Image (cartoon, rainbow, N blue to C red):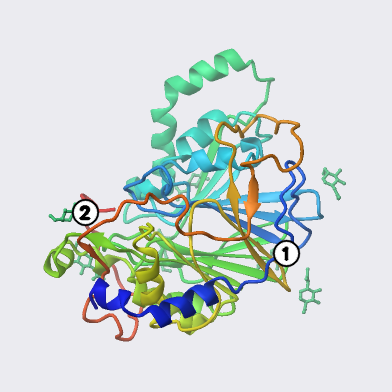
């Protein structure tokens, strides 16, 4: 369906927006330094929700999950650390020293590159940065090799920092450790520590062995994240029963003919907006989050309409950078985090400012016009391959090793 046809569905669009906004909202006030994650609540913060083609307001994929242990302490876990996402990690003012556990869905640059600053700069960590990620077709294409390469890349950086930092003997917070798991094992337990359990399941992306989906379980809450993948029935099976499902979808693209899209195999190696709706419809999570979309003022309504064509009801969010969801057994609160323009995070202590200073707060009102540029794009297209409404493919049984060149 062409964009213009989609745009002529105002009733559907309005319904979609109403459903989208229909999540329960609690107190919107954010008090600087005081907005703790409640006990038994998982806070999901979208640090980056976009594509490899990052721009200021939509960085590449990363999700910070903060597990509220006791109303005071949290366990921080990262799903992917894509290009630029460290900017929003700093913006949250979560201390990088307390972000030491990372899971990678696959090793594309837009999901891993900000491991570099996370490793290089967070020397307040009490132990090494721990990175769990998949194997590849051969040892040189797996997570261990990627992390070894990162260490080599930052060799001089670390020699220099370690020289000036004068770490005490035995200090390990400046180190990074990889934990590579076999990408091809279905529903595989890859992590079980302090009540947090993470499973992986093979995904399928650019015919290159390695991508996985991830499922985190903690205190009866389940959050499942697709990574980049074609739509798969095996993902639906993996994610059934999840409270929150975060699934990729791509689009729209600009000024490419359908033939050009097909020839580039972009749509065929990702999930379309209509397909992600099919997946949400099959799983029926308490909250469905579509991520990896190119969100702009002029793309939001067509994208929502496309997803709603196959997922007509149920809480839906199109992920925007610095969206915040607090998920408990009984409620899901959706907010957006606004940042002090010159705010600092990381190792720095939050300034002892008056509560809720202007420009630094959560908002409940999701305004998809903010902060997207008001430019109007012409030639905008959603992916609409002919097979969009066909049954989802099962995960291909065997995946041949192939080149990764030129893909993202
Ligand atoms: C938070 O963790 C600290 C350090 O482990 C502990 O002393 C404190 O009791 C915890 N807070 C609560 C509310 O349990
Ligand atoms: C990956 O590296 C870790 C840490 O060095 C090591 O324990 C593990 O055996 C390696 N895994 C593979 C598959 O090489
Ligand atoms: C990974 O798992 C698959 C499927 O279980 C198995 O066939 C393969 O031998 C495993 N690879 C390694 C390196 O253990
Ligand atoms: C995780 O570890 C705990 C304690 O060792 C164990 O009781 C539990 O069964 C494990 N969970 C899974 C899913 O294996
Ligand atoms: C998890 O669910 C079980 C069964 O409903 C319940 O007994 C338990 O209290 C729940 N745990 C938490 C942390 O909510
Ligand atoms: C992904 O793209 C490759 C070519 O780059 C193509 O051969 C393959 O069929 C596509 N994958 C799927 C699942 O369509
Ligand atoms: C799409 O093509 C039109 C016509 O050539 C051009 O004006 C417009 O800038 C293009 N849009 C993008 C996003 O490149």
User: Residue at the location (66% across, 26% down)?
Assistant: 171
From this viewpoint, is residue 205 visible? yes
Q: Kindly identify the residue that appears in the image at 63 percent across and 60 percent down.
A: 364
With 43 as the anchor, is 379 left or right in this view? left
Query: Residue beneath label 2, please?
Result: 403
On residue 26, which mark appears? 1
Neighbor class of circle 2 (other Cα within 10 Å; few <14, some 14-19, many 20+) is: few
Q: Pointer 1 and pointer 2: residues touching (CB < 8 Å)?
A: no
Q: Is residue 182 left or right of residue 273?
A: right
In terms of sequence position, does the residue under pointer 1 or pointer 2 come before the other?
Answer: 1
Q: SS for tag 2?
A: loop
Tell me if residue 408 comes above or below residue 265 in the rendering: above
Q: Residues within 10 Å of mark 1 (few under 14, many from 20)?
A: few
Task: Report how far apart the C-alphas of labels 1 and 2 lie in the structure.
Answer: 49 Å
Asked if residue 231 can be seen in this view, the reply is no
Which residue sits at x=56%, y=32%?
175
Residue 359 position within the rendered picture, expressed as x and y whole percent measured from the top left: 61, 42
The dot on residue 36 is: none
Where is residue 173 drawn, in percent x and y? 63, 32
Position above or below: 236 against 383? below
């Amino acid at each position: 369906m062409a964009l213009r046809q989609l745009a002529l569905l105002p009733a559907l669009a309005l319904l979609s927006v109403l459903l989208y906004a229909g999540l329960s909202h609690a107190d919107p006030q954010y008090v600087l330094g005081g907005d703790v994650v409640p006990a038994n609540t998982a806070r999901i913060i979208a640090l980056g929700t976009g594509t490899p083609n990052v721009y200021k307001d939509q960085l590449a994929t990363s999700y910070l999950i903060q597990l509220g242990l006791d109303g005071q302490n949290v366990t921080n876990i990262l799903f992917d650390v894509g290009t630029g996402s460290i900017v929003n990690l700093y913006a949250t003012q979560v201390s990088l020293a307390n972000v030491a556990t990372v899971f990678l869905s696959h090793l594309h640059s837009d999901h891993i590159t900000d491991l570099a600053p996370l490793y290089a700069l967070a020397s307040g960590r009490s132990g090494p940065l721990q990175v769990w990620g998949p194997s590849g077709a051969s040892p040189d294409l797996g997570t261990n090799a990627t992390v070894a390469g990162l260490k080599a890349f930052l060799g001089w950086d670390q020699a220099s920092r370690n020289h000036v930092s004068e770490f005490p003997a035995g200090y390990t917070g400046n180190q990074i450790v990889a934990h590579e798991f076999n990408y091809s094992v279905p529903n595989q337990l890859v992590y079980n520590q302090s009540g947090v359990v993470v499973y992986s399941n093979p995904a399928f992306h650019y015919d290159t062995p390695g991508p996985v989906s991830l499922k985190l379980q903690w205190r009866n809450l389940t959050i499942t994240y697709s990574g980049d993948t074609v739509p798969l029935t095996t993902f639906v099976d993996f994610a059934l029963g999840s409270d929150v499902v975060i699934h990729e979808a791509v689009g729209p693209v600009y000024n490419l003919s359908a033939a050009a899209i097909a020839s580039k195999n972009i749509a065929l190696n990702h999930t379309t907006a209509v397909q992600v709706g099919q997946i949400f419809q099959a799983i029926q999570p308490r909250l469905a989050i579509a991520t990896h979309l190119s969100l702009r003022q002029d793309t939001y309504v067509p994208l929502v309409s496309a997803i709603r064509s196959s997922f007509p009801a149920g809480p839906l969010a199109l992920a925007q950078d610095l969206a915040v969801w607090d998920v408990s057994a009984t409620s899901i609160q959706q907010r957006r985090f606004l940042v002090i323009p010159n705010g600092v995070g990381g190792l720095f202590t939050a300034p002892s400012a008056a509560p809720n200073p202007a420009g630094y707060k959560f908002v409940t009102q999701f305004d998809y016009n903010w902060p997207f540029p008001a430019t109007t794009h012409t030639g905008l297209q959603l992916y609409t391959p002919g097979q969009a409404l066909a049954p989802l493919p099962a995960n291909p049984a065997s995946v041949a090793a192939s080149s990764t060149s030129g893909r993202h």
